[in-house]
Image (tube, helix red, strand yellow):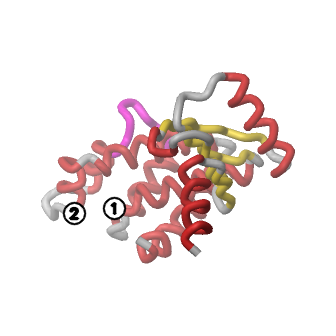
Amino acid sequence: MSQALTLARPYARAAFSLARDHGRLSQWASLLGFSHQMAADPRVGALLGHPSLVTKQVLDLLLPPGESDPNFRQYLTLLAENGRLRLLPEIHALFEQLRADEERVLRATVTSATELDESEVARITESLKKRFGREVALTREVDPELLGGAVIDAGDVVIDGSLRTKLSRLQSALAH
């Protein structure tokens, strides 16, 4: 995994620079997302390294129908020629990180034991905005095993306020 990230990093940076220079960050994010999804499909993935496929056929598989961005097509061609199409998931993830940094958006995930209502989500979003000084794009997940509370994963920072963790700490303290 770390080797794939190491290999993907310069390609993600190049994609980001090219997209930013042409004012197409959101379009490239969509295109990379589509290409990543297609490459992740086992049927398509099996074809990516096939020697009888020419680059144009591979590009037809990885580009959305009707897409005509010549820079993105050239970028995918470069990936194909260098045998790096299998890195599309990592390239897409790194591109999204660079994009979030550029747009000063914090991508965070809040996992709770039950579905949160809108007022709770708004309160968490506002708290994260104040703490990090950025706009917040919040993703919600539900994990009943947390028992109660929530876990907020904001990249390098994880705030674990789950009942499961609190009970685990209490059990540890009582055992010692």
Residue 153 in picture, x, y percent from top left: 62, 52
Residue shown at 54%/71% (left/top)?
A: 175
Label 1 packing within 10 angstroms: few (<14), some (14-19), many (20+): some
Q: Is residue 11 magenta?
A: no
Residue 28 in picture, x, y percent from top left: 55, 44
| Three-letter amino acid code at the position of disc 1 | Arg
Q: Indicate left or right for 154 with 6 as reference.
A: right
Task: Work out whether mark 2 precedes mark 1 in sequence or the reverse, and give the earlier one.
Answer: 2
Q: Indicate left or right for 43 with 9 as reference.
A: left
- Check if mark 2's residue and mark 1's residue have beta carbons within 8 Å: yes
Q: Which stretch is magenta?
A: 62-69
**Who is closer to the viewer here, 125 or 58?**
125
Task: Find residue 86 and name its label.
Answer: 1
Q: Main secondary structure of the magenta part?
A: loop
Task: Find residue 49 and name its label.
Answer: 2
Label 2 packing within 10 angstroms: few (<14), some (14-19), many (20+): some
Q: How many marks?
A: 2
Residue that sits furthest to the left in the current view: 52
Residue shown at 54%/28% (left/top)?
A: 115
